[in-house]
Image (cartoon, rainbow, N blue to C red):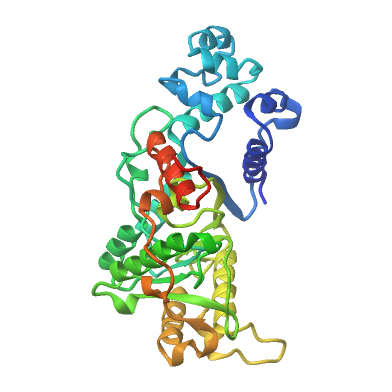
Amino acid sequence: MDGPLAYDLARAALRRARGLVGRMSALNDDTAWSEPPAGTGRWAGTALQSVAAFCETPDLALVPDPSVLPDGSDTSSWTSVLGSLPSPVQSALAGVVPVTPRAFAEIRREGFAAKFGRRDAQVALHRAIGEARELVYIEAPRFGASSHTDGAPQDDSGTEDSDAEWDIVQALASRLAAAPSLRVVLAVPKLPDYPPQYESFALFEYQARQAALTALTNGRAGQVTMFHPVGFPGRPLRTGTTVVIVDDVWLLAGTSSPTRRGLTFDGSVDVALFDRQLDEGYSAGIRQLRRSLMARHMGASAPGAGQTSTATWVKLARPAPAGLAIGELVSEEAGNGLVEGLYTPTPTEGHGTAAAASLADPDGRNLSLLIAAGADLLGTLEMLPPT
């Protein structure tokens, strides 16, 4: 892995391990945290963060305009800037003493993240899906619409970032219409990962992914395949992380999930990667990963020494034939016990009524709504005393 990407991931780990005050001693040390030179290896990429507003150092969300926080170009202005901030913010930053431009930039970044949240994975997916031509392969714990109605988040200049006001389902549908040769393959677990008390949340997810599939297959049924991987016969496979591969050229992998909640509310870290080693126009490492993921679900494997490749393994070599092959498997003979078609239960199957989107699939921007939703949830779970 090249130095800059490893550095970005180390910085992401530092944010999770230490608060803003604790980070200052590390980031003020040029010996330990000086930025590495540009890499020359085969992989290029970036670390992506998703987090709701009011989570990263919440006191900084009280800063009316985070753009007033110094960016490090003038390291002598911290005292005067601190004095101009609201008193709760001054108290929270009492132990923050930035010295290096790196430390100043970290405070500024934290200010924007606290006030507006971060939507890095959503923006990255926006661009990649908008340029897809052959295959979008998505393997994720859940899948559904990612749109919201509270306005776009703001970038570091304080202006709205329209790229982040985006719905992955509509983006895929638009791209499918624009590129008739494109195929979309979605591998999601059959059962959402909720404990017994959250049947209404599970039903919401069932309905959300069914609605997403309906929107995607509207007049394009042959281009879209959604299936449930099988761990072994009779046992669905659980999926804990997300992988999105576009045309065997671009890869996103990490802990976000392609839903409204997963891209705008839950905290996550992902990497977006490109393999500079090309083979017939495809990134060799990314194509190998996509091929191995699909082969696992389809019961195929690479031939051993002296063996002949199976037809399935050959089809998985390129994106378009791979998408066709998995579609044929899902539609014929019920997946041969390797995969299952989409499962959507009804409320009569013991799930009750689906939870509201504000509870099951929030976007985390409206703090008062979030607090009210949390209170409703606790009441639903009978964890609050009666009023």
Q: Can residue 124 be seen here?
A: no
Q: Is residue 157 above or below residue 286?
A: above
**Residue at the (30%, 77%) spot, across then down:** 221
Indicate the quadrant where residue 225 lies: bottom left
Q: Give residue 87's position: percent from left, percent from top.
A: 51, 12
Where's the C terminus, which quadrant?
Answer: top left
**Residue at the (53%, 18%) spot, across then down:** 89
Q: Give residue 76's position: percent from left, percent from top.
A: 58, 9
Which residue is nearer to you in this view: 165 or 141?
Answer: 141
Which residue is nearer to you in this view: 105 or 16?
Answer: 16
Q: Is residue 46 above or below residue 80?
A: below
For residue 56, side relative to residue 221 (left or right): right
Q: Residue furthest right?
A: 31
Number of numbered markers: 0
Q: Can residue 258 be seen here?
A: yes
For residue 358, side relative to residue 316 (left or right): left
Q: Give residue 197's position: percent from left, percent from top.
A: 52, 60
Q: Is residue 83 above or below residue 257?
A: above
Q: Residue furthest left?
A: 219
**Residue at the (65%, 30%) spot, across then down:** 19
Which residue is nearer to you in this view: 310 or 293?
Answer: 293
Which residue is nearer to you in this view: 387 or 204?
Answer: 387
Indicate the quadrant where residue 100 lies: top right
